[in-house]
Amino acid sequence: MPQFRFQKTISRGATYTLAALLLGATFGCSSALSQELPQMGDTSGAIISPEQERQLGEAFMREIRRSLELVDDPEANEYLQALGYRLASNADYREEFTFFLVEAPSINAFAAPGGFIGIHTGLILATESESELASVLAHEIAHVAQRHLPRAFEQASNLSLPTAAALIAALILGQNNSTITEAALATTLAGTQQSRINFTRGNEKEADRIGMQLLAASDFDPRGMPDFFERLQQAYRFYENSLPEFLSTHPVTLSRISDSRNRADQYPAPKHNTQSYYPYLRAKLRVLSGSSAQDSINYFKAAFNKGTQEEQSVARYGYALALLKGDKLVEARDQIVSLLNNDRERIPFLLAYANVEIAAKNYSAAIAALEDTLSLYPRHHPLTMLYGEALIKDGQQAKAKQVLQEQLRFKKTDPALYQLYARAAGETGFHAEAHHALAEYYYLIGETSTAIQQLQLARDSIKGEDFYLTARIDARLQDLKSEMSQIPR
């Protein structure tokens, strides 16, 4: 049986300039604040069509996956996507949004064409409430919905799709991208005074105003925006000579904090205060980003008896994850079981329990717990991904292949899902399907040449025995070869 090897090239240390999302020009004042959201997404006079913008965004996303380390935790990404959708559902914008996490300690976020919005893990850890995090997403959603981005990318409009995506990635990253030739840079950047994206003062005022309206319409506390502004201002007030570049040019002024708080105070308090995954996400990111398991163990253990019951539950959850990271499986299981005894339906606890059992090679226990939960939440992506992994490790590759193949009908852009499906297919003898899935995995992470190699391996594995699969592979090969031909050498 052939071995299917997974590779990913990541450039650590690639840094963004702080995207224009939080700290732009001063808030505009208004004598009366409308409770109705404005019409968004007017495409009149747009430089590119919504479909072209989406294609550009997807190509940009492949460039980002190739260049940066993204958080591949399905649970964290599912939460961020749900939070973003909650806000975006109140924006008059017909296209789809995609929200993703960048593994980086900096306080940063950015928006790209086609509704792709990235958030650094450092920013989430810097927030202290879900409304603060939502304020960042709302601001970025407003930039996309108001189509500020296509106008900023006019200089890329005459380039091939791969080159335009690479250029935009270079602009947002604030650095040259190795996939762009000197000629492309010369022709596209020659007339500019900067090599990064800066929104106009008008764009920033509009995004701030609409972002706050989205917060209120989505039942978040609009005061989360000035609260976050104020804490950033306090954190950097003594660093005048070493501020992040964006903070140097777009300071969080006292005037802006005051204006944003005055605007927020015109909205009523949120109607609901439901339980949220937000504090559990922060606990998980603190463990994932921590320098050592022991540091995380000490941090969360110290918080066991502090705060409300919910805060103590979060501390115990973080403690369990830190124990798991440190391979202290018996202690981790005890903590998770304690949490489950108090709340057996909290999905983060069930996922943590299954992860502990998988780490301990108690696959049957993990599978039973996941099957019970999936009966309540069918097609839940984090549960399904972990279920597929547990089945494979338990020797039930055929069942895993069936489960993951069904999930691919609903999640067609998750590289990790294609990777896991390829593993299940390869280990059950479906080598052509495994190579085909690996081709999609490599394509989504920006390794198009490797994707083509996998498609060729898939075609060789068929040996003319499946006409329809051969036809699909040939069509995909033609598409990817055509795209490769447009990339500058």
Image (spheres, grey):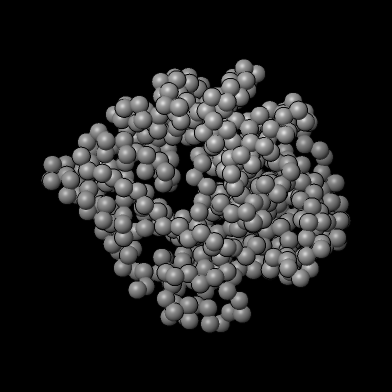
* Residue 255: % across, % down: 86, 61
For residue 108, say whether it is visible: yes
Query: Residue visible at 60% across and 60% down?
Result: 147
Query: Residue visible at 69% across and 32% down?
Result: 301
* Residue 32: % across, % down: 85, 53
Query: Residue visible at 60% across and 52% down?
Result: 119
Name the quarter where the C terminus is drawn: bottom left
Residue 40 lies in what quarter of the image? Answer: bottom right
Q: In this view, which residue lies farthest toward the left?
A: 464
Query: Residue visible at 31% across and 68% down?
Result: 485
Q: Please tell me whether residue 247 is drawn above or below residue 232 in the rendered image.
A: below
* Residue 373: % across, % down: 50, 22
Residue 26 lies in what quarter of the image? Answer: bottom right
For residue 82, say whether it is visible: no
Q: Nearer the viewer, residue 175 or 94?
A: 175
Q: Nearer the viewer, residue 23 or 482?
A: 23
Q: How many marks overall?
A: 0
